[in-house]
Amino acid sequence: MDTFKLEQARSWILTAAAALEKNSALLCDLDAAIGDGDHGANMARGFSAVVKKMETNPPADIGALFKSVGMTLLSTVGGAAGPLYGGFFLELGKQTVGKQELDAAMLVSILEAGLADIKRRGKAELGDKTIVDALTPAIETMKGAGSDVAAATRAAAETARDAAVKTIPLLARKGRASYLGERSIGHQDPGATSTALLMESLAEVSAKA
Amino acid sequence: MKKLINSPENVVREELEGIQLAHGDIVRVSFDPFYVARKDAPIKGKVGLVSGGGSGHEPMHGGFVGLGMLDAACPGHVFTSPTPDQMFEASKAVNGGAGILHIVKNYTGDVMNFDLAADMLREEKIDVASVLTDDDVAVQDSLYTAGRRGVGLTVLMEKLLGAAAEKGMDLAQLKALGDSIRATGRSMGMALTPCTVPHAGKPSFELGENEMEVGIGIHGEPGRKRVSLASADEITQMLMEPILSDLPFKSGESIILFVNGMGGTPLIELYIVYRRAAQIAEKHGLKIVRNLVGSYITSLEMAGTSITVLRANDNLISLWDAPVKTAGLRWGI
């Protein structure tokens, strides 16, 4: 597959919503260990609102779709994940105004812009035990994976999944987990895990095209 | 899970319906989006004080909306920051033309969401400033954490700034006063039992019969260390010493002493804690000029306590004594 089309962007969000719903309890358990135990519930609630909005108001292009996803997440997720993921999708929307399809290079560049927004808003760097630790290596992998969107997103999804697991030995330096200091070590970061689910959903819908 | 609820999804909405029915003489509740506003807001020429945070800390913040305290409060889901659209709409609803002051507890989510709301308000040409509370000495304040949490000092901040706004202080003066309160108040808390977030259905951590968590926050998150259960006097000492040595509070200073219950601790125990805290303060040469004892910033049904000490002066004492009429605090009228 050479391009990622509006239809895949729609499927990505639907698939991600289903994955977040299915893994809601897992994300809540991960969050309970080092945070306050609501990450899964918040993400599932936000994406379920996104799906409803998409059904009643189908977006005409990829930019409009991502913008709508971002706005809905901002007003429904709450916590830190709301502004972070909401801002991420708003940034994706800004980068894709009027677009009907994206090639692999474009997909990489919009994800990079989204990552930059998360880092700016959350003031997080690589190694702080956050979303950034899954997203950064996933994008790096995608960059080196060629122009086939299906292959590139598959490689990125696997990197994100491994990277989420690699947050286990890290000491949290951002968010509520940072209050625990040394006690945050030994637990997988819920934000990195939800990012890995988003990347897995992206790979699934790209493979089906 | 044993709770007096109908369903986890409806906890916040039904609570707000109850608040509207119980306190309709003081507040009006917006249900889309969720916020609680003073019934007589906007008050022309007065700075609007807006706070908010996750639900589950009642009476904070909705119970502090009214004369002499907040103009509006935005409740999030239980232990989850509210969203920018709530803060934006609540701020607009109480804007009397003198600007809006956001009182924000230092949590990653709260800070980011209030920042976004402030940006939205500035686009509408509304003056906005914000005051942060980050008084929890249990958290190391360094580049490697999200900074100290905002806890008990938030209650005192809302009371004092509310009185100052009522007296006609402008936005810049309120911001400066808030920053000085922030700089001179310290808190620390502990838990005897965990609490259960309704939609999670199980306790956020486990504690053995003979264990307690010292240095807890207000969201059911574990604390800095788990230690063997101790007596009320010993526990009070464990909280007071780090608080007093952190600022530090010096002999001869006046303070406001606030002993807070976490939700599941009866007043009888809080007074036992207050007794010892007052003795320790006296031993350090501190003069308690005002106090507050009760459950004002809670963590659902968690048993435990937090102590807050704020340096006081004549100005703060007169603001403390000023009339307040809210669901949670009421005096002087």
Image (cartoon, rainbow, N blue to C red):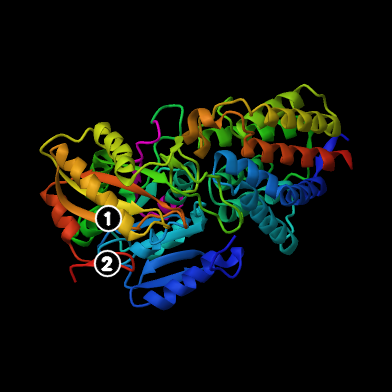
Q: Which residue is mark 1?
A: B271
Number of numbered discs: 2
Nearer to me, B140 or B1: B1
Residue range corresponding to the magenta coloring: B120-140
The subunit letter for the residue under badge 1 reads B
Check disc 2 and give the amino acid type: Lys
Nearer to me, B246 or B166: B246
| First reached walking from the N terminus: tag 2 or tag 1 | 2
**Which of the 4 quarters of the picture holds residue B321?**
bottom left
Kind of element beneath mark 2:
loop
Is residue B201 shown left or right of residue A61? left
Q: Position of residue A23 (x, y in %)?
A: 73, 47
**Which of the 4 quarters of the picture holds residue A127?**
top right
Q: Residue at x 29, y 43 (%)?
A: B233
Q: Quadrant of the C terminus of chain A?
A: top right
Q: Residue at x 34, y 62 (%)?
A: B64
The numbered mark at residue B154 is none
Q: Which residue is mark 2?
A: B44
CA–CA distance in space, label 2 to label 1:
41 Å
Q: Is residue B36 above or below residue A178?
A: below
The subunit letter for the residue under badge 2 reads B
Kind of element beneath mark 1:
helix
Q: Position of residue B108 (x, y in %)?
A: 48, 41
Q: Residues within 10 Å of mark 2 (few under 14, many from 20)?
A: few
Q: Is residue B122 magenta?
A: yes
Q: Residue furthest top?
A: A144
Check disc 1 and give the amino acid type: Tyr
Task: Tell me, yes or no, if residue B2 can be seen here.
Answer: yes
Nearer to me, A19 or B71: A19
Nearer to me, B262 or B102: B262
- The lab-note entry on whether marks 2 and 1 share a chain reads yes
